Image (cartoon, rainbow, N blue to C red):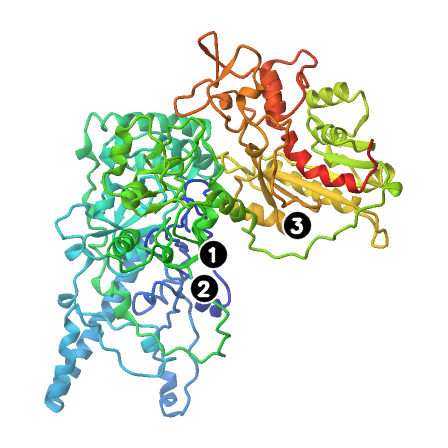
């Protein structure tokens, strides 16, 4: 469940306990079935665990800690417990004073009783039992006196015994610790305990059952049915269950229709998610560990932590054994061996029932304090909690003509929409927008999108049969928006053309926008959450004053920048390149006849070097994307691994900038992948103080290659237009006697199988009635390089593909560099 949960340390100041947030969001998700990293695009309920207990058991609170049950849109704080004032024989005269001496306050950090040690729990139970018996005796005496004096008062107290009416509270000052801190105990016979009435609706899935649960946007995720007590919220409604998810320990209320027993492992387990998401691997491991213990099939335990999430060798080996055991039906004991033991069916049977007063009945919050009125234009950011059936219910209202399609997010069902969906008629919320930005250009090994085109999620997807299309649609979205049974009909249809390839644009409630290509371009161009000052504009330089350009190229690769500058006819005075790959340096030296000055590792370049080699007119670079791309499940992000090399570009960019009094034109360009986390993109933009433009090479070449470009080059956002000599079809890039099976190929990377196309992994070329891969010379044409550009030093085909997979698309860089002809000398 992708989302990082941070454990808050206990504060030494008692007042901090009043302000700490402890929010449990019910329903599907940013959450988190994290960033993920990983599949999860809408967060699942967050819950912060903190098990700090009081240091002294003797000062245990007189009643169990309870939390306020706020509305789903508001966070709630922990309430401090205040012990009763001790009876001191030396303080007999204190009662007559107008103001008592304040009692020292002992703070208590509320925690989950499930995790309290037995010894500590027994001490607390004894203390609470004695306190409850004393209060019960006092209430009996008071009730007898009230019956004699005020018979009508009894009528007001009778409804308190029913479950439907909250327990009446004595009206006192809101600051009174008796009401605000200590809920009144409820008699044993008047309260249903968790073991008496929870999950008794006859629909299965009782306490302790191991299940797979389904939330929108996630694969079936393993979890365990738990009591409402553990969640810290109110009881689940009939037909729903509280589920604690393995992997991150978060909680959700899930309909029983969205639950499957763990014994259905073979049908619920999703191998692609297991391969890509460390949190999913951890969840599967934890669930099968519990299952193996119940079945009497213990396995050596592995240490958790980073190895458990990252997939260490020992954990992978053990996971494979557990998965094989689960796939074969949990033999030899079978599914019945997974039934929860008695102690898990009744986890609280030894706990005094008065400690489990429902949160909504335990405390009546005081009226809110007055605050200055805010401007109506300031809309607070409220995280919307959407239950599992929200989208289905809203779509039904649209079918009944009681709601408009443009009013809801067609991806998740949220009513808190912020923009229009770029591909289909309908709206989109901010959370789904972020998911779309991350996943729209993320592709699996089969060449298709990793997630559904509509919702950026889905466990079972339908892949388009059009060889030139790489989109897929999840079964849930198809059945919901197109019509029930549409997914089954699409599966039977072979080949099946998706809703982006069909000639007619209306399919049930799913209507394709006529201008979706331009809308998609605008969507990525205007996806900026941050506003920056406009880049400085330099007026064109007069022809007689133009000078040759000086270039600093960081992470240079195979010198694509120098190749494009020369193709444009721009004179290059000096080209200083930082590169560490031996093969890339060899290509640059051979193809450019030693005109490149290689300076080694970018981390070794200092300010003095920049002053000696400069001044520079253009700084370009694209740091490695391995730890930034969300395709990599083991990515480390912007601040670890190779992601940190971005800051080397940022450092040297500032060293190369002209002085404030120097008004000469100065340009720069930074490139990286589109499929990066939204937070990493936001951080890069904040450092570079500008927003990126997204350019896909498919418009000017025979391959898909979407990239983000940051910079101050003139006209970066202008439309991308193909030139006469650009090879837009794969057939134009092939040698004589070879036939292309596809119009365009998917993104060519450093991996050897990236040249295979389609869901069946077809080779892209026919030759002599046989399928064949792309030759190296053909891949060079696809990228726009001259033929045999990388054919140096007897490099193998795979080595040459790796060089091309890390390079830039020549037509795209030519598009970006073309305005520089107005500033520098040309041939």
Mark 3, other Cα within 10 Å: few <14 / some 14–19 / many ≥20: few
**Which sits earlier in the primary sequence, circle 2 or circle 1?**
1
Q: Which residue is mark 2?
A: 20
**Which sits earlier in the primary sequence, circle 1 or circle 3?**
1
Q: Which residue is mark 3?
A: 687
Which element is circle 1 on? loop
Quadrant (top left, top right, bottom left, bottom right) of the N terminus: top left
Asked if the residue under mark 1 is in contact with the one under mark 2, i.e. CB atoms within 8 Å, the reply is yes
Residue 35 appears in view? no
In terms of depth relative to the viewer, which is nearer, 799 or 293? 799
Asked if the residue under mark 3 is in contact with the one under mark 2, i.e. CB atoms within 8 Å, the reply is no
**Which residue is located at x 68 percent, y 24 percent?**
581
Q: Which mark is residue 553?
A: none
In terms of depth relative to the viewer, which is nearer, 642 or 467? 467
Q: CA distance from mark 1 to mark 3?
A: 29 Å
Residue 31 appears left or right of 391: right
Quadrant (top left, top right, bottom left, bottom right) of the C terminus: top right
In terms of depth relative to the viewer, which is nearer, 49 or 635? 635
**Which residue is located at x 66 percent, y 50 percent?**
687
Q: Which residue is mark 1?
A: 8
Q: CA distance from mark 2 to mark 3?
A: 31 Å
Which element is circle 3 on? helix
Q: CA distance from mark 2 to mark 1?
A: 9 Å
State which quadrant residue 781 falls in. top right
Please determine whether, in this image, residue 351 is positioned above or below residue 460.
below
State which quadrant residue 423 falls in. top left
Residue 646 picture location, percent across and down: 66, 41
Residue 248 picture location, percent across and down: 39, 45
């Amino acid at each position: 469940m992708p989302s990082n949960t941070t454990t808050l340390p206990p504060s030494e100041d008692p007042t901090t306990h009043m302000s700490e947030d402890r929010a449990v969001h019910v329903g599907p998700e940013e959450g988190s079935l994290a960033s993920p990293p990983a599949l999860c695009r809408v967060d699942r309920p967050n819950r912060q665990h903190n098990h700090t207990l009081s240091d002294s058991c003797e000062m245990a609170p007189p009643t169990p800690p309870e939390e306020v049950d706020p509305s789903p849109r508001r966070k709630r704080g922990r309430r401090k417990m205040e012990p009763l004032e001790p009876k001191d024989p030396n303080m007999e005269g204190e009662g007559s004073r107008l103001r008592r001496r304040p009692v020292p306050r002992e703070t208590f950090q509320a925690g989950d009783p499930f995790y309290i040690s037995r010894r500590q729990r027994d001490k607390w139970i004894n203390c609470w039992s004695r306190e409850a018996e004393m209060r019960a005796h006092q209430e009996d005496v008071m009730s007898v006196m009230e019956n004699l004096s005020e018979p009508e008062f009894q009528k007001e107290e009778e409804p308190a015994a029913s479950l439907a009416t909250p327990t009446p509270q004595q009206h006192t000052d809101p600051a009174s610790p008796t009401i605000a801190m200590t809920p009144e105990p409820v008699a044993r016979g008047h309260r249903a305990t968790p073991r008496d009435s929870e999950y008794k609706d006859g629909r299965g899935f009782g306490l302790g059952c191991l299940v797979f649960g389904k939330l929108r946007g996630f694969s079936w995720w393993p979890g365990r049915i738990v009591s409402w007590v553990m969640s810290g919220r109110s009881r689940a409604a009939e037909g729903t269950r509280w589920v604690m998810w393995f992997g991150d320990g978060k909680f959700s209320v899930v309909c029983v229709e969205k639950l499957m027993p763990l014994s259905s492992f073979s049908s619920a387990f999703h191998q692609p998610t297991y391969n890509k998401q460390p949190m999913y691997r951890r969840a599967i491991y934890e669930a099968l560990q519990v299952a193996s213990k119940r079945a009497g099939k213990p396995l050596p335990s592995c240490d958790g932590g980073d190895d458990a999430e990252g997939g260490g060798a020992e954990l992978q080996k053990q996971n494979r054994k557990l998965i094989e055991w689960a796939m074969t039906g949990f033999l030899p004991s079978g599914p019945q061996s997974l039934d929860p033991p008695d102690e898990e069916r009744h986890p609280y049977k030894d706990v005094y029932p008065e400690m489990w007063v429902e949160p909504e009945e335990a405390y009546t919050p005081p009226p809110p304090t007055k605050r200055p009125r805010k401007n109506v234009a300031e809309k607070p950011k409220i995280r919307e909690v959407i239950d599992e059936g929200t989208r289905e219910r809203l779509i039904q209202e649209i079918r009944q003509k009681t709601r408009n399609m443009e009013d809801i997010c067609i991806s998740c069902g949220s009513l808190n929409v912020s923009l229009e969906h770029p591909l289909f008629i309908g709206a989109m919320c901010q959370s789904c927008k972020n998911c779309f930005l991350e996943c729209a250009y993320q592709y699996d090994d089969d060449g298709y999108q990793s997630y559904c085109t509509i919702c950026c999620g889905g466990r079972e997807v339908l892949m388009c049969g059009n060889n030139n299309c790489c989109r897929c649609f999840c079964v849930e979205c198809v059945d919901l928006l197109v019509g029930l049974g549409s997914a089954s009909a699409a599966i039977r249809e072979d080949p099946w053309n998706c809703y982006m390839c069909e000639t007619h644009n209306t399919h049930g409630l799913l209507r394709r926008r006529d201008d979706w290509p331009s809308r998609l371009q605008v969507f990525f161009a205007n996806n900026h959450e941050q506003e920056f000052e406009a880049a400085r504009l330099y007026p064109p330089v007069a022809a007689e004053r133009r000078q040759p350009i000086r270039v600093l190229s960081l992470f240079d690769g195979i010198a694509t920048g120098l190749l494009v500058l020369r193709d444009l006819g721009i004179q290059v005075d000096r080209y200083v390149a930082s590169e560490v790959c031996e093969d890339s340096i060899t290509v640059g030296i051979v193809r450019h006849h030693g005109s490149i000055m290689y300076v080694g590792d970018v981390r070794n370049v200092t300010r003095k070097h920049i002053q000696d080699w400069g001044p520079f007119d253009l700084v370009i670079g694209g740091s490695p994307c391995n730890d930034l791309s969300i395709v990599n499940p083991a990515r480390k992000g912007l601040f670890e691994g190779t992601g940190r090399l971005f800051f080397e570009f940022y450092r040297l960019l500032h060293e190369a900038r002209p002085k404030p009094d120097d008004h000469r034109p100065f340009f720069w360009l930074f490139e990286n992948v589109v499929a990066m986390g939204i937070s990493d993109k936001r951080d890069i933009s904040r450092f570079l103080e500008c927003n990126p433009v997204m350019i896909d090479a498919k418009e000017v070449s025979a391959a898909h290659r979407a990239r983000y470009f940051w910079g101050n080059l003139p006209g970066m956002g202008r439309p991308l237009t193909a030139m006469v000599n650009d090879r837009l079809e794969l057939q134009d890039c092939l040698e004589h006697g070879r036939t292309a099976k596809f119009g365009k190929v998917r993104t060519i990377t450093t991996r050897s199988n990236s040249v295979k196309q389609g869901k069946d992994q077809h080779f892209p070329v026919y030759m002599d009635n046989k399928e064949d891969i792309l030759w190296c010379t053909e891949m060079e044409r696809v990228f726009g390089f001259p033929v045999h550009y990388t054919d140096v030093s007897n490099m193998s085909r795979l080595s040459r593909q790796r060089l091309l997979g890390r390079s830039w698309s020549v037509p795209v860089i030519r598009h970006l560099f073309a305005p520089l002809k107005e500033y520098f000398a040309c041939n």
